[in-house]
Image (cartoon, helix red, strand yellow):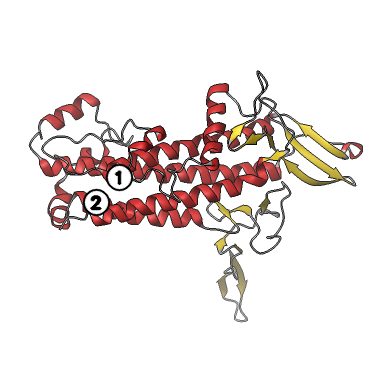
Amino acid sequence: MTKRSKDRRGYRKISVQVPIGEKKIAGWPVSGDDLKPIKNLDGRPSKRIREEGSRGYFKDAQGYWRRTDTNIDVDFDNLCAATHGHIRRSIISDVEFEIFHDRIPDWVHMAGVEPESRVTKAQFEKLIAGSASERVLHKFIYLQDVQGLLTNVQRTSAQVSQVIGEFYGILNDCAPYLYSINETVGLRSSVGAETSLLHAHLETIFVRMRSLLDYAVKISLEAERDDIDYSKIVKLKGGSRQYGDKKSLTMNERAGTLFVKDELIWTICSIRDRIVHDGHLDISARLYESFKRNRLVERFVLIPDMAEGRFEVFKNRSNFYGRDHKINHDLPRIYDDFFQRMLNTIGALHDLYALKRLR
């Protein structure tokens, strides 16, 4: 912002006004456009963090959703970046990388992977056929494919983090129904466009977390394989594998990883399966609002009763709500537990690849 004025000699001068200090939440710069930027678990936004360590969501200055109490997503990205390096050094030595990296054509890195590449499947096959004896080329192709698995883990985890933020953004800021003053009493429920979108975000979160379980198995199978023949194109061992194939892993059932199928994993799998096979988590897709003295005191979303990670079912009835399971209160804990185990799982792969470094 600039300010024009004249000095006492009549000369026009221009001064630049620099903003003093930038608003920050939990160490992240934020825009000042939202008067209540903190999106809380109870669906009531606030100007600032209610108390130290409380869980809430907000958008930083670049529009990314952040947590008020943790940076576990940033820690995860940093670990993945280090793991990418160890994967490379386990497949291509530093000497090979220095000699050949700049000579490798772009199609090795991009064809069949990135939309920027205009190479067709038939063209790719011809390019491969023309390099049948290129061991180093095959190494770079395999490197791209393995690192692609880890990149997909990163992208999917980032999607989960951002969709959770969007879920709480809608929960806190939506206006599902325009109440008269006489209607803002007791417990109300509503359905509509915003509540449908709210539930769609919730369902996406569990579907994508379930995808991460598959990816964890795929990349772990690559990390555990030995004696790779680079005289031909290397097919990913875990390319078509899914979470149920974790029994093939040496680290299967390792404590603290995603490969222990306990209540957390059962919960994610059960919710995902219901969404995929039944088409919805809650057929009503409702949002509940609680009022006291004509003021909103809570918003929440219910999901059907579960026990030990499985839905409670009797004959044809599978949507019981006697436990009042408010998923908006439980979602951050599920996320934290899941991503801590993601950190442990990728950390184990990080260490395994580090041991396989080529000299």
Q: Which residue is mark 2?
A: 88
Nearest to N terminus: mark 1 or mark 2: 2
Quadrant assignment, res 187 = top right
Corner quadrant of residue 132: top left
| Count of labels in the image | 2
| Residue 91 locus on image (x, y percent) | 20, 48
In percent of width and height, residue 300 lies at 72, 41
- Residue 136's place in the image compared with 357, above or below, is above
Per the image, the residue denoted by label 1 is 147
Please tell me whether residue 175 is drawn above or below residue 340 in the rendered image: above
The reply, left or right, for residue 282 in relation to residue 338 is: right
What type is the residue that disc 1 sits on? Gln
Q: Within 10 Å of the Cα at label 1, are there few (<14), some (14-19), or many (20+) other Cα atoms?
A: some
Badge 2 amino acid: Arg
Residue 14 lies in what quarter of the image?
bottom right
Which quarter of the rendering shows the C terminus?
Answer: bottom left
Identify the residue at image location x=59%, y=81%. 9
Residue at image point 78% right, 33% down: 189
- Is the C-beta separation of discs 1 and 2 under 8 Å? yes
Q: Is residue 96 left or right of residue 19?
A: left
Front residue of this view, candidates 253 and 164: 253
Q: Is residue 202 above or below residue 98?
A: above
Q: Residue at x 48, y 36 (%)?
A: 210
Side (left or right) of 94 relative to 170: left
Q: Which mark is residue 296?
A: none
